[in-house]
């Protein structure tokens, strides 16, 4: 990925402006996807000129990152809109929370793989198979497909120091 040359009207990095093509390069998304997000109200470029041109800011890139994570977690379009328009977390807190969620997803995936590998070993002969482990495989895979627990975790802001909530 090349480093786009964004327009910098001021010293403050938060005021750096990027064209759609540059935001596309930064994010890895196609220009068409960015325009669609704008059209459906998920991500509007912060700066719009009378000429019709519009520019994205650093804040827009942060919002785009949040949007991508919420899509991965299974949020609906309206849930994403609500979250993006609520008070934002500090970027470091947001990234910490997202990392925690991904680590939990990985933990669940590793559990499913472990049970699958074990089921392969103990079920070499279908006549004497231990079907209990196949049930554990199904249960572990279902835990990966439970978006509600990840959504709740994300909305609540992650693990609370007291009474640590679980994903």
Image: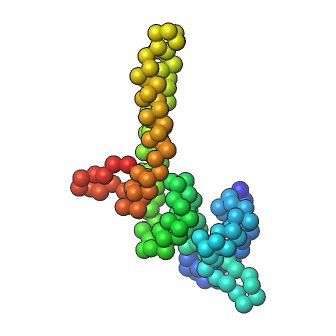
Say which residue appears at 44% left-offset and 41% top-offset: 143
Q: Quadrant of residue 76?
A: bottom right
Taking depth in this image into account, of 13 and 157 the one nearest to the observer is 157
Query: Which residue appears at 61% of the width and 83% of the height?
Result: 10
Residue at 64% x, 82% y is 47
For image coordinates 46% across by 66% down, the residue present is 91
Q: Position of residue 81 (x, y in %)?
A: 53, 70
Specify whether 107 is left or right of 125: left
Quadrant that contains the N terminus? bottom right
Name the colour scheme: rainbow
Give the x, y percent position of residue 72.
Answer: 55, 53
Total tally of numbered discs in the picture: 0
**Is residue 160 visible to the viewer in this orientation of the structure?**
yes
Quick one: which residue is furthest to the bottom in this view?
50
Residue 165's spot in the image, x, y percent?
31, 52
On the question of residue 4 being in view, the answer is no
Q: Nearer the viewer, residue 57 or 76?
A: 76
């Amino acid at each position: 990925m090349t480093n786009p040359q964004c327009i910098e009207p001021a010293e403050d990095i938060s005021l750096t402006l990027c064209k759609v093509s540059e935001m596309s390069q930064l994010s890895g998304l196609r220009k068409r996807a960015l325009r669609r997000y704008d059209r459906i109200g998920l991500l509007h470029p912060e700066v719009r000129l009378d000429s019709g041109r519009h520019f994205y800011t650093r804040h827009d890139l942060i919002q785009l990152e949040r949007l991508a994570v919420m899509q991965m977690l299974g949020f609906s379009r309206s849930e994403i809109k609500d979250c993006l328009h609520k008070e934002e977390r500090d970027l470091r807190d947001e990234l910490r929370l997202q990392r925690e969620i991904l680590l939990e997803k990985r933990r669940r995936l590793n559990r499913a793989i472990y049970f699958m590998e074990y089921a392969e070993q103990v079920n070499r002969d279908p006549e004497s198979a231990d079907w209990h482990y196949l049930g554990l495989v199904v249960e572990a895979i279902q835990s990966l497909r439970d978006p509600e627990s990840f959504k709740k975790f994300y909305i609540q802001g992650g693990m609370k120091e007291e009474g640590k909530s679980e994903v």
